[in-house]
Amino acid sequence: MTLTEFLLARFMDDEERCVFAPVGKYRMERLDGREEKREADAQRMMDYVHRFQPDWVVDDIHAKRRIVDLAREARETDGAGYATADAYMRDVLRLLALPYAEHPDYRDEWKP
């Protein structure tokens, strides 16, 4: 599995957990903001809560901040820290994968 395949699989996992975010016993809100009335089953609610625990959300925010810092630095230095665009994108992808470091498919070589 490549890093990009890993990321796309994790994004799909997250999206599947969030398509119907539990907001009440009989109301589910879709990511597009529409509401559908149906009973929120306990398993879906537990999956959602388990996946988006505060520690994970904070890790995700930190990784995204590092990406923004990386982009700012590259722009301010005209990419002087990178030999190629591939090297820059490799670092961006590694930072995007960092919040998923506890996943069994995550590889240590992907750490930034």
Image: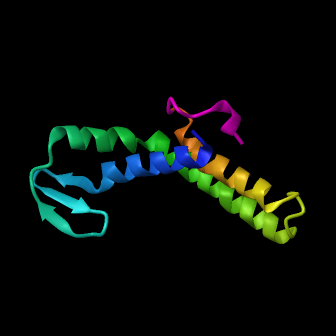
Where in the figure is residue 88, as x and y percent of width and height?
76, 57
Q: Residue at x 35, y 38 (%)?
A: 50
Q: Is residue 89 within the magenta segment? A: no
Q: Assign the N terminus to one quadrant of the image.
A: top right
Q: Residue at x 90, y 63 (%)?
A: 80
Vertical side of 72 occupied by 90: above or below: above
Q: Is residue 104 within the magenta segment? A: yes
On screen, residue 45 versus residue 50, left or right, reads left
Where in the figure is residue 87, as x and y percent of width and height?
79, 54
On screen, residue 43 versus residue 111, left or right, reads left
Give the extent of the magenta segment. 103-112
- Residue nearer the viewer, 24 or 13: 13
Vertical side of 100 occupied by 64: above or below: below
Vertical side of 31 occupied by 17: above or below: above
On screen, residue 12 versus residue 90, left or right, reads left
Q: How is the image coloured?
A: rainbow
Q: Residue at x 60, y 42 (%)?
A: 2
